Image: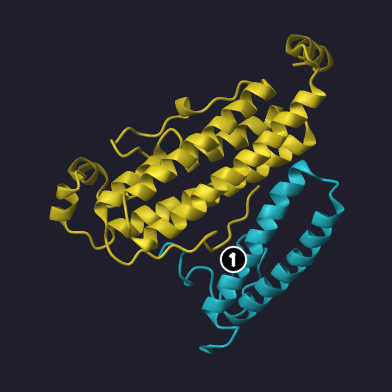
Amino acid sequence: MWIYQKKLEFPVDIKCPDVKMAKALLAQYGGPDSELAAGVRYLTQRFTMPDDRCRATLNDIGTEELAHWEMLGTMIYQCLRGASASEIEAAGMAGYFTMHDKGVFPCDPNGVPFTAAYIQSTGDPIADILEDLAAEQKARATYEHLMTLTDNPDIIEPLRFLRQREVNHYQRFGECLQILQEIIPNNNVRYKNQFAECCTI
Amino acid sequence: MNCSCEYSKENLLKRISEIQFVCTELNLYMDTHPDDMAAKEDFACYASELQDLIGKYEELYDPLLGFGLSVPKAGSWVRSAWPWE
């Protein structure tokens, strides 16, 4: 189970509305490489991960991603707080406003709703960890794009923190890949057969 | 409770976030390096400091953990500010 801690992992205090950035930040709230996708991906893949260390990594990074998702929701909420209807329209968010008002909804900046099709859980440990490595790199690139879109330090500081977390998670998943390559014999198909033999499904 | 000392609400929460970040990083490192004794020692030290800080914060201000992991003393779970406010 999870226990909620009534604080953010990193402080967010955006003082002035910024609808353009609210729209852009949706990429990391409900897009394909979002914190939501990351959290669901890792917490789902962990069930069939065959090594204690890799299971722990998926469990704990997946948990941290939920804290990042909360930071993104906070950033979007604060960027919309106090914004006028004309500011929302000027930033190209009239469609979003029509459907969600200032509610925070998991979609990408173009309004495409979040879907589990963004993630995989193949049951193949190496395929899953390779997806996770790619996910961390795609999220890092997205944070860099977001950081080029604003010069507001209230927004840049949490983005810088979140970008760095992607780098650190990538490092840990790289170690998981090494671990799996050591414990899984060269012939991956043979490993899978052995796995099937010892586990009654 | 409005002191500007190291136990002000803002300072205590900042310190908790800092030490908790150290613990998070060490936790993830130890996930892939479970036998690293130096990391284990560091983790024990910072985790103990974190427990003390959380205890202090909850004694003076608001509960941080739900579901019975905090026993509310000073503040209220419902009425204390939510982190996005």
Residue A89 is left or right of residue A6, and the answer is left
Q: B68 or A47: nearer the eye? A: A47
Q: How many numbered marks, from 0 up?
A: 1
Q: Is residue A106 left or right of residue A56?
A: left
Q: Identify whether A192 is placed above or below B11.
A: above
Residue B46 visible (yes or no): yes
Rendered position, A136 above or below A191: below
The tint chain B carries is cyan
Q: Position of residue B67 (x, y in %)?
A: 63, 60
Quarter of the image with the C terminus of chain A is top right
Tell me the residue that label 1 is attached to: B17
Query: Callout 1: few (<14), some (14-19), or many (20+) C-alpha neighbours within 10 Å?
Result: some
Measuring 61% from the left and 66% from the top, which residue is drawn there?
B18
Report in which chain the residue with disc 1 lies.
B
Colour scheme in use: by chain
User: Chain A is which colour?
Assistant: yellow
